[in-house]
Image (cartoon, grey):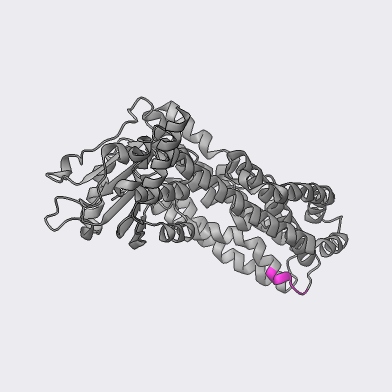
Amino acid sequence: MRKLLSILALGALFLIGGAPAASASQATDIVIEDTAGTLDANTLLPAIEKIKFNEPTKVAIYTRAGNESDNLNEEVLRFAREKHPEWLSSDRQKWADSLFVFALDPAGRQVGTYFGEDRKVSPGQRDDIQNATKDLFKEAQWTDGSIAGVERAAQLMNRPWYKSPKLYAWSGGILVVGGISVGSTLYVRKTYRTRSEKALEIGNASYSNVSLDLEATELNAKTINGDSRYGSLVLEKYRGFMAAYNDLAEQGNKANDMDTKLHQRKETALFMEKYAGKATELDRLDDVIADTNMLLNMGSGWAAAWERQLAPLREDLAEIDPLVTGKHAVPDAPAAIALTRFKTMTADEVEKWGAALQSRQLSPEDGLDKIAAAREELTEVLKEYSEAVIAKFAKDKEEEKMMRAAMRTPEASGTSHSSNHSILGTVYPSNRFWSVVGFSVGYRSGRSSVQESRSASSSTGGSTGYGSSGGSFSGSGSSSRF
């Protein structure tokens, strides 16, 4: 029996070794239509460019922010007809040859895959491609999930006979490669490895910055006036700086000594991201200590330090118009009108504060007080506006409660990168001030929670129809929920 198994194994190896060499092709064109605003193009595009296809293929990636009740197939076809007729065949009844369309609706929690006639795959393979994305999409890893979907499609479309898992199954299970579940698992592992390595790189860079600035940070802290309102609060943060730095050094040693084979595990990715987060936090804090010293003592670089304190407020002012005029806005709400008025008045005031600081008619502490007061006023108006957008979307009290909870979490009310690098963003709790960016994040989270609740009883199986507006369209494709 053992001899027979050996012969079968050798036969399988011979078959594999004698198979013709696969011809790998890159995407001939890549079109990204991220109308939902959920993808990181700087990560997505290079990753898609590296993927090898069995035949030259045009890749189109389309995202939309819809509802759980939408027919994604119908919406993708509608978008193609309106914006990209070249995605359709000459008779407009099928998808164009050599085309693969990957669609994602993060709000409606649906994923779809669509194929030109010369790229279509079996229904089971369509499911395989979509399933390769779902673990990542459930974690809101929209970019990584999209990459995994395109990568799996590239493997399955026009797959040569000698790459089929059925071929390897012939050997009695001695050599088993490919396969649906194995393929999906490999992509998830690859994603965790990428996350681990990216976090390690960020953590090491931030740790290096902190180490190089260690002496300067100590000197800056010593020259901050401890009797100052803001100076004393920043110094409180500094008191634990060295202990945190020593802890970070231990984390860094552990992260860098870890076997790279472990990078593909979820727990490793989470550990690396924790290390990166701690390192970034310390790197941010030493910058804030430097700005506090420079601004409160009106040193030679005070103007640049002052601009960094204004940056979060300026960002909010720039985002108010889209917030009150966008797709889900309630422009006639009193709070929307108040937001527009706040933007106009505050933009003028900000310039006056800078001039008063320069002429020494305004002290640095009073200047920070004015920024804090403006952000507190904005916070109150945003809270009022949140009730207006909740009332527009929610269908009952339970949905209102669900959205309200999502919009009042620290993550939702939390601020932008520039705020985290400001004095106010450092000395006050993260939920002290609401930001317009944080408001939008919270609203999307609330919508997603409500839509997930509404669709809880819906089937997660695939859908292949193109709806009433699809007409006689019969292109290959389907969508499913995650």
Q: Residue furthest top?
A: 457
Name the residue rendered at 14%, 54% in the picture.
Answer: 92
Q: Quadrant of the C terminus?
A: top left
Name the residue rendered at 20%, 54% in the picture.
Answer: 81
Residue 138 screen position, x and y as percent: 46, 38
Magenta stretch holds residue 15: no
Residue 55 screen position, x and y as percent: 30, 57
Quarter of the image where one finds residue 45: bottom left
Is residue 426 visible to the viewer in this orientation of the structure? yes
Name the residue rendered at 30%, 51% in the picture.
Answer: 101
Residue 419 screen position, x and y as percent: 63, 55
Q: Quadrant of the N terminus?
A: top left
Q: Which residues are magenta?
A: 300-304
Is residue 176 visible to the viewer in this orientation of the structure? no
Left or right for 217, reference 431: right
Q: Residue furthest front?
A: 3
Name the residue rendered at 37%, 35% in the picture.
Answer: 169
Q: Nearer the viewer, residue 343 or 283?
A: 283
The chief SS type of the magenta part is helix
Q: Nearer the viewer, residue 215 or 146?
A: 146
Quarter of the image where one finds residue 226: bottom right
Q: Is residue 198 above or below residue 429?
A: below
Left or right for 472, reference 432: left
Please count the marks in the image.
0
Residue 442 screen position, x and y as percent: 50, 42
